[in-house]
Amino acid sequence: MKEENKELFKALVKAYDDGTFKEVINNMLKESDDKDSLMALISTLSGIDSVIDINFVDILEKKIKNYKSGKVVNKIVSCPEGCKSENKERSCSASCPFNAIFYDADEKNIKIAEDACIDCGICVEACPENTILDKVEFLPLLNKLRSGDKVIAAIAPAIAGQFGDKAALGRLRTSLKKLGFFDMVEVAFFADMLTLKE
């Protein structure tokens, strides 16, 4: 997540958690000079594809509750003309190792070829205008944890070294269970199971 979006994300999570989500977002939209861009940004930070609609908050809440996984990297608004570098190449397309980002001359804007994009997020970091972002799927997860469904955290083996020496895998499992997860499994376990099965 880009640094400039962290405070907005924290406000959205707090509002969702304390039941003031609708009120907080409506107040943000009232104060905004660019409501469409703000709706697109809030959608992405809420973990869903961009929604720009007069019934924005109602649609947003419904999509969070009925979350369907999809592409993580999204182009949320049109790029300003000034984001080209001196050599007339855009930093997002220059950063993409898969040539998934291209300029559409008809629409005069940058597009992401979904079949070529692998959601690596390099373009998100390279985009100076905050127009390409990765969806933060935290609110759909929070909603899922609250629903009572059995949610299992699938963690990468690298997690063992990410929280210091005292964070053993057993302690992480206990912590995740206290947060509401049913259990925790390491994704490498599934690779081992597949190998055994084959």
Image (cartoon, rainbow, N blue to C red):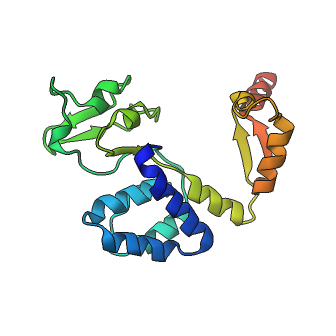
Visible in this render: residue 30? yes
Closer to the camera in the image, 86 or 99: 86
Residue 27 percent coordinates (x, y): 39, 74
At a point 45% along the width and 58% down the height, the residue shown is 8
- Quadrant of the image occupied by residue 39: bottom left
Count how many numbered circles sit on residues in the image.
Answer: 0
Q: Is 181 left, or right, of 170 in this rendering?
A: left
Q: Is 93 left, or right, of 182 in this rendering?
A: left
Closer to the camera in the image, 58 or 66: 58
- Quadrant of the image occupied by residue 84: top left
Q: Is 152 left, or right, of 3 in this rendering?
A: right
Residue 198 percent coordinates (x, y): 76, 22
Instruction: Say if 163 sits above or below 22 in the image.
Output: above
At a point 81% along the width and 52% down the height, the residue shown is 177
Closer to the camera in the image, 45 or 101: 45
Residue 94 percent coordinates (x, y): 29, 25
At a point 51% along the width and 71% down the height, the residue shown is 21
At a point 69% along the width and 27% down the height, the residue shown is 158
Q: Is 66 left, or right, of 154 in this rendering?
A: left
Instruction: Say if 120 sits above or below 54 in the image.
Output: above
